[in-house]
Image (spheres, rainbow, N blue to C red):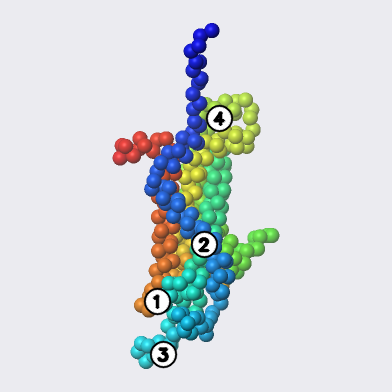
C-alpha cells in the first residue's frame, strides 16, 4: 500500500454561505446594519429609560420641577421674549435621565418620547413590511402560476392600486378610517390602534411587491423542473410551496430592508399629518409635528426625530443594497456594465 496520502474531496460551501460571506465583507452594509441595530436597541430600552428617569412621556407635566446642580428648575420657563407672555419648554440639559433633550410644549421629556416614538415607528414599519410581503407574495404566486382569468382579475386589482400615488392613497385611506376604524365582520380595529397604520401602509405597497413576484413566477412556470412536476401530476399548491417559493426567497429577503425604509417614511408622513399614530401614542412623525411650533426656540424637538428617521432610512437602504448584491449573483455583472 502506498504511503501517499489520499486526497479528500474538498467540501464546497452552499450558496447561502457564499452569499453571507460576501455580505460580511461589505463594510458599508455591515456598518449600516450595526447603526440600525443600535437604534433598535435604544428604542427597545424606552420603558427602562422612562422608569429610570421617572417620567411619563405621554402625560403633560406643565408644572414639573427638576433639579440641576442643586437648584430647582421649572420644566416650563416663563417666556422672556416680547411681552413675556406664555412659557418656553426647558432646553436640553445633556444629562441622561434628566430631560437630556429638553421638554416639548406639554412639558414632556423629549428623550423618553423619542425612544417610545422610535419603538412605534419601528413596530409599524416592520409589521407593515411583513403584511405587504405576505399579501404581495400570495397575489404574485397565484397570478403568475395559474394565469388565465385569475391572473387577469388580480392584475387589474393591482393596477388599480398602482394607479394611485402612494401618499395620496395612504392619506385617503387614513382619513376614511381615522374616525371609526375598520370593522369587517369579526375584525374590529379602533381608530387609535397601531394596527390601523400597519394595514393602510401595508396595502398601498402591495403592488410594488406583487408585480415583480408575478414576473418571476411567470418565468419559473415555464421552467423544466416545474413542467416536469406538472406532468407528473403534482398538485399546484405543492409546486408553489416546494418548487417556486424557494426560488423567490432571495427576492423577498432583499425586499425586507428596502420596504421597511419606505414604510417608515410613509408612517412618519401620516403621523406628521395627524392621520397616523394617534395620541397618547407617539412616533417620530408626531414628535416632529409637536416640535414644529418650537423650531425657533427649541429646534431639537423637531430636528432629532427627523435625524433619526434619516439615519434609519439611510442605514436600511445601504444594507438593502449590500444584501441585494450578496444574494443576486448577477449584480456584479450588472454593475460592471453600468
Whichever of labels 1 and 3 marks the residue nearer the N terminus, that label is 3
Whichever of labels 2 and 4 marks the residue nearer the N terminus, that label is 2
| Image spot of residue 147 (x, y percent) | 54, 38
Whichever of labels 1 and 4 marks the residue nearer the N terminus, that label is 4
| Residue position for label 1 | 298
| Residue position for label 4 | 226
Count of all numbered marks drawn on residues in the image? 4
Marks 1 and 4, how far apart at CA: 62 Å
Residue count near mark 1 (Cα–Cα under 10 Å), binned few <14, some 14–19, many ≥20:
many
Drawn side of residue 195 relative to residue 160, left or right: right
Q: Is residue 174 above or below residue 3?
A: below
Whichever of labels 2 and 3 marks the residue nearer the N terminus, that label is 2
Whichever of labels 2 and 1 marks the residue nearer the N terminus, that label is 2
| Residue position for label 2 | 43
**Mark 1 residue element:** loop
| Picture residue at 50% right of the left edge, 26% below the top | 11
Q: Give the quadrant of the N terminus.
A: top right
The reply to whether residue 4 is visible in this rendering is yes
| Picture residue at 43% right of the left edge, 47% below the top | 30
Marks 1 and 3, how far apart at CA: 17 Å
Drawn side of residue 293 relative to residue 182, left or right: left
The reply to whether residue 215 is visible in this rendering is no
Q: Is residue 220 above or below residue 56?
A: above
Whichever of labels 3 and 4 marks the residue nearer the N terminus, that label is 3
**Mark 3 residue element:** loop
| Picture residue at 55% right of the left edge, 41% below the top | 141
| Residue position for label 3 | 85
| Picture residue at 54% right of the left edge, 67% below the top | 49
Amino acid at each position: 500500500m502506498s504511503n501517499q496520502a489520499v486526497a479528500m474531496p474538498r467540501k464546497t460551501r452552499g450558496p447561502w454561505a457564499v452569499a453571507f460571506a460576501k455580505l460580511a465583507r461589505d463594510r458599508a452594509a455591515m456598518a449600516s446594519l450595526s447603526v440600525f441595530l443600535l437604534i433598535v436597541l435604544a428604542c427597545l430600552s424606552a420603558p427602562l429609560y422612562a422608569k429610570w428617569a421617572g417620567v411619563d412621556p405621554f402625560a403633560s407635566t406643565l408644572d414639573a420641577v427638576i433639579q440641576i446642580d442643586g437648584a430647582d428648575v421649572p420644566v416650563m420657563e416663563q417666556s422672556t421674549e416680547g411681552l413675556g407672555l406664555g412659557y418656553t419648554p426647558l432646553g436640553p440639559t445633556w444629562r441622561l435621565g434628566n430631560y437630556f433633550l429638553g421638554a416639548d410644549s406639554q412639558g414632556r421629556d423629549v428623550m423618553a418620547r423619542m425612544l417610545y416614538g422610535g419603538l412605534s415607528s419601528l413596530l409599524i414599519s416592520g409589521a407593515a413590511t411583513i403584511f405587504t410581503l405576505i399579501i404581495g407574495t400570495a397575489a404574485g404566486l397565484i397570478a403568475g402560476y395559474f394565469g388565465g382569468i385569475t391572473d387577469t382579475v388580480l392584475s387589474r386589482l393591482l393596477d388599480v392600486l398602482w394607479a394611485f400615488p402612494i401618499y395620496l392613497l395612504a392619506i385617503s385611506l387614513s382619513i376614511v378610517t381615522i374616525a371609526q376604524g375598520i370593522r369587517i365582520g369579526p375584525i374590529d380595529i379602533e381608530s387609535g390602534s397601531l394596527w390601523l397604520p400597519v394595514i393602510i401602509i401595508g396595502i398601498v405597497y402591495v403592488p410594488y411587491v406583487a408585480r415583480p413576484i408575478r414576473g418571476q413566477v411567470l418565468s419559473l412556470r415555464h421552467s423544466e423542473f416545474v413542467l416536469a412536476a406538472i406532468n407528473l401530476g403534482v398538485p399546484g399548491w405543492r409546486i408553489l410551496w416546494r418548487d417556486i417559493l424557494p426560488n423567490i426567497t432571495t427576492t423577498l429577503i432583499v425586499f425586507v430592508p428596502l420596504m421597511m425604509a419606505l414604510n417608515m417614511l410613509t408612517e412618519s408622513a401620516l403621523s406628521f399629518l395627524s392621520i397616523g399614530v394617534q395620541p397618547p401614542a407617539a412616533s417620530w412623525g408626531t414628535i416632529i409635528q409637536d416640535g414644529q411650533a418650537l423650531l425657533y426656540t427649541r429646534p431639537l424637538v423637531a430636528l432629532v426625530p427627523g435625524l433619526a428617521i434619516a439615519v434609519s432610512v439611510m442605514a436600511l437602504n445601504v444594507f438593502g443594497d449590500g444584501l441585494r448584491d450578496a444574494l443576486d449573483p448577477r449584480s456584479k455583472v450588472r454593475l460592471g456594465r453600468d
